[in-house]
Image: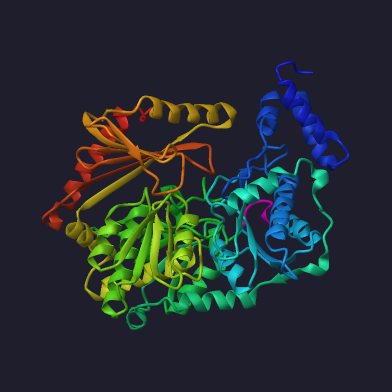
Amino acid sequence: MNTTIDEAILAKAQLWLTENFDEETKKEVKNLIDNDPTGLTDAFYQDLEFGTGGLRGIMGVGSNRMNKYTVGMATQGFANYLKKIYSNLPQIKAVIAYDSRNNSSYFSQISADVLSANGIKVFLFDALRPTPELSFSVRYLKCQGGIVVTASHNPKEYNGYKVYGDDGGQLVSPYDKEVINEVKKIKSVADVKFIPNKDLIEYIGETVDNAYIEKVKALSLSEELVKKYSDLKIVYTPLHGSGVKLVPWALKEFGFKNIVSVEEQNISDGNFPTIKSPNPEESAALDMAIKKAQASNADLVMATDPDADRVGIAIKDNSEKFILLNGNQTSVLLVYYVLNKWKENGKITGKEFIVSTIVTTGILKEIAEKNNVESKEVLTGFKYIAEIIKKNEGEKTFIVGGEESYGYLTGDFVRDKDAVSSCCMIAEAAVWAKNKGKTLYDLLIDVYTEFGVYKEQLVNIVKKGKSGADQIKQMMLDYRENPLKEISKIPVVKILDYQLQIEKDMLNNQTKPYDHLPKSDVIQFFLKDGSKITVRPSGTEPKIKFYFSVKENIMDSKDFAKTIEKLDEKINSIIISMGLNN
């Protein structure tokens, strides 16, 4: 036996050699014990945390991996929560969807089995579906909860599991904590009811699809313009994911007739064979689509991630070259279009609002204010946007919202990011611009000329495994205990620490409470020149994220390219000064 294995980890692993686990699992665990101490440590050094968003992790055997048993234990905890909260109902109901990842269908069936074994009625989609349709389905089917099996845009080794409340939004405090507590009470797989009550599992599909698409179609703000420019050529790729059916369907319902597929990527495959990563935030993911667009002289390129809640786009610049937009730029176009159309259509009454996150571009607030629309800001995570929508139901109207990580939402019938409806609204923005004799690129520059050029950049520092998690904790501790007084020779004037809920005035050396938002492990540095740097560990990946935002006003659209270069240089200087360029 390898003596380098921690005794507690070894003892934990040996529990997986008992009769409660299947033979294949026991064989794989035994192999780790005998031959791979590092792999064994990573697989068992902790329990895969059921966090505020659910589970996400690498697939494989072990307590720190996504597998039948960790999914089963999480689902048992969720079942216990539902039975506790809704004990007065004669029948508790939940809906389950899944994406194209390896084992997603299997994990969704395990989840359905466990819920049904606990007496909960389950609606299980008959094939892969987008996350936003799951969110919609919770309320449409009058369920008390929902589950979607997905790891969103993570690498192929990952899978995940998100839970939803009766409003169709991911759970927020205190409900998320209550579910977490119930999951923590499940100490052994022996506590999990794996044998299903098949009478309580109902497979669903087309009826819900039709209802969802009807709601998406009703979002249209420029029906006549779409008819006029119905030949707008759109290249769309689902990146081997669940958008393959509903995105083209929704676009056609809007009236767009010229949709070009990237056939190789229409194949639903959790190995994502044509791309390194199924993340539309990464330029390489759109390479095939852009080549197709160039070859076919298309107007617009769109790509959605595996569970079709995020969308990345590419548009033509003034030299007819396709350029990728980041999440902030796409949100600028979407929000600017939607608010201006609401204004044109006389729909703004003063009781409307938009929502963005603390790391999303500040220009959205300025666009909203100019249109007499309130702008609300929340922590990173779309569940907080859903929470704000729920809190304002019946009093104020949510129009549109988004976050820098390529997630957007128009309307409130979905309570999560929705790439299906976003693709339609972005395409509609393109014909709105075209009717003004402009491209989306022209429109973007117009917005920046009006409100100032905002430039944002995200830097991810990956730290894998237990040692990586420890390093990330230490980095956050260092920023708190030794706060930066200047960055790139620019004085830090203010620091917001959302975990400690304090605001530090660095110029006057004063600290005061800051409790406008819930606690979160996030630190923001505000510089004298208006720049902002946000630091936060990822809640779903082994990363620490650095968000940079800089701004400069321009007098003429001709100055745009030069200003972007200047702002890129400023961000690069900040990155180097913080030692993040290595």
Image coordinates of residue 468 in percent, x first then y, are 53, 29
Image coordinates of residue 484 in percent, x first then y, are 31, 28
In the picture, measured across the screen, residue 212 lies left or right of residue 355, that is right
Magenta segment's dominant SS is loop
505 or 133: nearer the viewer: 505
Image coordinates of residue 79 in percent, x first then y, are 72, 56
Q: Where 328 falls versus 208 (above or below)?
A: above
**Magenta segment: does it hold 101?**
yes
In the picture, measured across the screen, residue 216 lies left or right of residue 225, that is right
In the picture, measured across the screen, residue 21 lies left or right of residue 366, that is right
Q: Where 3 falls versus 342 (above or below)?
A: above
- The residue at 57%/48% (across/down) is 52
36 or 285: nearer the viewer: 36
Q: Where 560 falls versus 218 (above or below)?
A: above
Quarter of the figure that contains the N terminus: top right
Look at the image and give the residue range highlighted in magenta.
100-105
**Magenta segment: does it hold 570?**
no
Q: Farthest top residue?
A: 3
